[in-house]
Image (cartoon, rainbow, N blue to C red):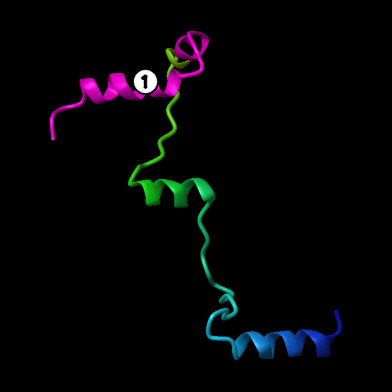
Amino acid sequence: MTPEEDAAITADALNDPDNPPIDDDAEFMSWDEARARLLGRTQVALELDVVERFRRAGDDWQERIDALLREAAPAE
């Protein structure tokens, strides 16, 4: 891209209220973080030796762990 083409693209973007350029100091989040925010969930990483036992017992291991944790959690 030539400097002239870059300047023309930047000028067009600056004049487009529906598509402004991104600030140089803009911060981005991962897809997983955005999805968790939309779903109202918090992503947590745990190192548990029992996870492998759940995995070996079937593909629905995450759902089974979630159900057990919800049951064990204090009432809201």
Image vertical order of residue 30 relative to residue 69, above or below? below
Residue at the (51%, 64%) spot, across then down: 27
What number of labels is visible? 1
Image vertical order of residue 73 relative to residue 3, above or below? above
Residue 51 is a magenta residue: no
Residue 69 is a magenta residue: yes
Q: Quadrant of residue 15?
A: bottom right
Residue at the (75%, 89%) spot, across then down: 7
Residue at the (60%, 88%) spot, across then down: 14
Image vertical order of residue 18 relative to residue 52, above or below? below
Q: Position of residue 17 (x, y in %)?
A: 53, 85
Q: Position of residue 20 (x, y in %)?
A: 57, 81
Q: Which residue is mark 1?
A: 65
Label 1 crowd bin: few (<14), some (14–19), many (20+), radius 10 Å: some
Residue 2 as seen in the image, left or right of residue 25: right
Residue 14 as seen in the image, left or right of residue 59: right
